[in-house]
Amino acid sequence: MVVKSSISDLDAQIEKLKERRRSLIVKSAERFARAAMKSGLAEMEIADEEIDPIFEEIAARFRKEEKREPDGAPPQTRRPADDGTGTQSEVSHDG
């Protein structure tokens, strides 16, 4: 049996998806802002045309690492573990 959605139902779904998209963008921006603050980048006077290529290099590095994952295994996330206090504990990336 085929379920037909009304235009208003579709519009409501579209609005929910748009709101979810906005929320994901804000969370991503906050995550990178925290990293920039923690590393001191946020306080440096660096032009966008200097930062953009650096971020492109970083993204390329992580894309290459994802491609190296074992056959069909999902890429591992690189998020620090949450210690339950609302702050994230640091994870060593030294091998």
Image (cartoon, rainbow, N blue to C red):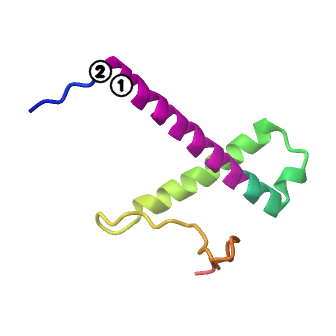
Residue type highlighted by circle 1: Leu
Pick the front one: 3 or 14: 3
Residue 9 counted in the magenta span: yes
* Highlighted range, magenta: 6-32
Residue located at (82% from left, 57% from top): 37
Is 89 on the left or on the right of 41, as rendered? left
Specify the label residue 6 is tagged with.
Answer: 2
Q: Which residue is mark 1?
A: 10
Spatial CA span between label 1 and label 2: 6 Å
Q: Position of residue 36 (x, y in %)?
A: 78, 55
> Are circles 1 and 2 on residues that touch, CB within 8 Å?
yes
Residue located at (29% from left, 21% from top): 6
Residue type highlighted by circle 2: Ser
The chief SS type of the magenta part is helix
Residue located at (58% from left, 37% from top): 22
Quadrant showing the N terminus: top left
The single residue placed furthest to the left in the displayed view is 1
Q: Position of residue 55 (x, y in %)?
A: 67, 48
Residue located at (59% from left, 75% from top): 81
Quadrant showing the C terminus: bottom right
The quadrant holding residue 62 is: bottom right
Picture layout, residue 70 above or below residue 4 = below
Is 43 on the left or on the right of 63, as rendered? right
Graded by Cα atoms within 10 Å as few (under 14), some (14 to 19) or many (20 or more), the crowding at tag 2 reads few
Q: Position of residue 93 (x, y in %)?
A: 62, 76
Is 56 on the left or on the right of 6, as rendered? right
> Is disc 2 placed on a helix, strand or loop?
loop
The quadrant holding residue 39 is: bottom right
Picture layout, residue 46 above or below residue 15 = below
